[in-house]
Image (cartoon, rainbow, N blue to C red):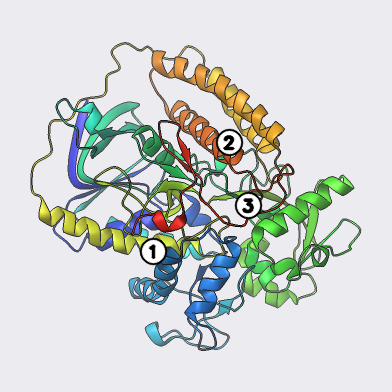
């Protein structure tokens, strides 16, 4: 067994993890960054639309704040919304300083901070406030930050390492201070388990949309951080709010190719197979309605008409306009035989974003001392019952800065060495005899989550899902206890935990709100409350004002 020690262990290499590493690197601290695949391979890389920020003189913070609250169906925490919205211009300036090249207005020349940037509008926003890099903002941000982090001498990057479990006080004899000391991780290349000790641990592992059969997320989005934090004793909140992106390219081989909301922001309309528009019958903002409404409208029209998909049409715009604004999306569509410059393209909703997660404050702190959560794996209260478009990368950037500040102060206060950490014990296990068991369980889980815990829910469907995940958990526990772990088994174990948490949260909420829509309780209650699960299975609806500072 191999033990690695550092001041800070960051699990996850997306925008949140890279931003945090870069901000901490200016101090004399050692950082270990684990990535379960290639460093940039995560949801951040595939973010198309952009980053919401008040950058125009005709816009203002209060408008962005109100739009966020409206999209979040009155469940957003105002302190979180204000901090993150008001921190947006500074975060954008920091990215520009690091070399991120955002798209400029037509004819403008790039000159750093004073450049005139093109701002687009997305669903739920009352102004054009989404700064972007064409239709590949995530790639521009992620690869730019990656270049900086790879050059840092005090950051050790270990790719193809998937975290298994956190090392907490419970694993150390004689300690009862509810603290995190590190994590166990599997080196996928060698299939060896390593022990990582750290004075502070950060989970920036992203969301959990791979729990669903159809998703826009990459294969890495298996909710690892959320599941590990739950097993370590942290509270989890609002997992019932799974955002389904309304427009995923419909093609058997497209594998979740996202069609950015910015396409609708620039004038695209949704049509039925016969060419008729329908969104104006569902919401006054039509195609620019919040994502939950658009996704539910598409789901309704598909079921009512028996359609395999609906169609997104921006062909009324000029070819030059489309290729200038959406070159990567157009190229992706062309790969599958669709020319978005001349024809409508088939789209369906797909699981896209996890609004709930590890309960954390605005410095990223969780219930476990020395454990932080940043980005999609966390639940700060920003998104409420439905994330406003392009607020996700923004949250990563702003909370990463405040987490870095908190960790910096933490490391200055205490210089005590790490205790000796117990090694991973696999003396009683053997190599797995049949991998097909894992494959079948993985497929079953994603299918019943799509069928029973999808866009429209009922208690009956949720109970069916609960029964199935219970049986699945028993099989996984038996398998996990007898065989050496591998990447597929670790992810399956985490996804089963994610499914269980999502189902329990959904069954607890006896109303429809935001992304959680149930036919049994179609109305919203007068007062919005959060669903908070604790590891002893106690469910509470705590007022949002009682969350961390």
**Vertical comparison of 319 with 444: above or below:** below
Residue 252 in picture, x, y percent from top left = 72, 42
> Which mark is nearer the camera, 2 or 1?
2
- Is 466 above or below relative to 413? above
State which tag comes first along the sequence, 3 or 1: 1
Q: Position of residue 294 (x, y in %)?
A: 72, 59
Residue drawn where x is 19% and y is 59% of the image: 408
Q: State the residue position of label 1.
A: 397
Neighbor class of circle 3 (other Cα within 10 Å; few <14, some 14-19, many 20+) is: many
Q: Which disc, if any, is residue 503?
A: 2
For discs 3 and 1, the disc positioned in front in the rendered view: 3
Secondary structure beneath disc 3?
loop
Residue tagged 3: 515
Q: Is residue 193 left or right of residue 5?
A: right
Marks 2 and 3, how far apart at CA: 14 Å
Distance from the alpha carbon under mark 3 to that under mark 1? 24 Å
Considering the numbered disc 2 on the image, is that residue within a helix, a strand or a loop? helix
> On the picture, is 263 further left or further right than 424?
right
Q: In the rendered picture of this protein, how many numbered marks are placed on residues?
A: 3
Residue under the image location 80 percent in, 58 percent down:
311
Mark 3 vs 1: CB contact within 8 A: no
* Measured Cα–Cα span from mark 2 to mark 1: 30 Å
Q: Earlier in the sequence, mark 2 or mark 3?
A: 2
Q: Earlier in the sequence, mark 2 or mark 1?
A: 1
For the residue carrying disc 1, how many other residues have a C-alpha within 10 Å: few (<14), some (14-19), or many (20+)? many
Q: Identify the secondary structure beneath mark 1.
A: helix
Which residue appears at 17% of the width and 51% of the height?
Answer: 30
Residue 29: percent from left, percent from top = 16, 54
Q: Quadrant of the C terminus?
A: bottom left
């Amino acid at each position: 067994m191999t033990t690695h020690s550092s001041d800070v262990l960051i699990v996850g290499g997306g925008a949140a993890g890279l931003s945090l590493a870069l901000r901490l690197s200016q101090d004399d601290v050692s950082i270990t960054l684990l990535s379960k695949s290639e460093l940039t391979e995560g949801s951040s890389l595939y973010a198309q639309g952009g980053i919401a920020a008040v950058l125009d003189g005709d816009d203002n913070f209060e408008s962005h704040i109100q739009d966020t609250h409206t999209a979040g169906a009155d469940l957003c925490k105002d302190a979180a919304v204000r901090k993150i919205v008001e921190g947006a211009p500074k975060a954008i300036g920091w990215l520009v300083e690091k070399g991120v090249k955002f798209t400029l207005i037509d004819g403008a020349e790039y000159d750093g901070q004073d450049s005139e940037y093109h701002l687009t509008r997305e669903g739920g926003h009352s102004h054009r406030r989404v700064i972007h890099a064409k239709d590949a903002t995530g790639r521009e941000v992620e690869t730019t930050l990656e270049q900086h982090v790879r050059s840092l001498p005090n950051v050790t990057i270990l790719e193809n390492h998937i975290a298994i479990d956190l090392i907490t006080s419970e694993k150390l004899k004689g300690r009862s201070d509810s603290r995190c000391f590190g994590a166990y991780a599997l080196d996928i290349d060698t299939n060896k388990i390593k022990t990582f000790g750290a004075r502070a641990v950060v989970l920036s592992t992203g969301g959990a949309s791979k729990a669903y059969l159809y998703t826009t997320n990459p294969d890495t989005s298996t909710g690892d951080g959320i599941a590990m934090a739950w097993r370590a004793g942290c509270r989890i909140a609002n997992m019932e709010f799974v955002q389904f992106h309304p427009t995923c390219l419909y093609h058997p081989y497209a594998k979740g190719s996202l069609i950015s909301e910015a396409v609708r922001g620039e004038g695209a309309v949704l049509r039925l197979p016969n060419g008729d528009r329908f969104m104006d019958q569902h919401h006054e903002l039509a195609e620019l309605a919040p994502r939950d409404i658009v996704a539910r409208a598409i789901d309704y029209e598909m079921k009512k008409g028996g359609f395999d998909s609906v169609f997104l049409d921006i062909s009324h715009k000029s070819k030059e306009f489309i290729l200038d604004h959406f070159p990567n999306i157009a190229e992706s569509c062309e790969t599958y035989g669709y020319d978005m410059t001349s024809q409508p393209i088939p789209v369906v909703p797909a699981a896209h974003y996890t609004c709930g997660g590890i309960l954390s404050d605005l410095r990223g702190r969780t219930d476990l001392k020395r454990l932080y959560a940043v980005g999609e794996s966390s639940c700060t209260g920003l998104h409420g019952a439905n994330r406003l478009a392009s607020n996700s990368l923004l949250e990563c950037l702003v909370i990463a800065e405040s987490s870095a500040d908190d960790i910096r102060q933490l490391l200055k206060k205490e210089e005590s060495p790490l205790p000796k950490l117990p090694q991973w014990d696999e003396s009683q296990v053997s190599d797995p005899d049949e991998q097909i068991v894992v494959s079948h369980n993985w497929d079953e889980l994603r299918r019943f989550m799509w069928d029973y815990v999808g866009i429209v829910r009922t208690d009956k469907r949720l109970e069916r899902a609960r029964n199935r995940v219970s049986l699945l958990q028993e099989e996984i526990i038996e398998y996990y206890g007898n065989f050496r772990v591998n990447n597929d088994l670790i992810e399956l174990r985490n996804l089963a935990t994610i499914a269980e948490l999502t189902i329990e949260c959904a069954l607890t909420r006896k109303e429809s709100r935001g992304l959680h829509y149930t036919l049994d309780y179609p109305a919203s209650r007068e007062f919005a409350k959060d669903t908070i699960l604790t590891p002893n299975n106690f469910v509470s609806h705590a007022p949002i004002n009682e969350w961390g500072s």
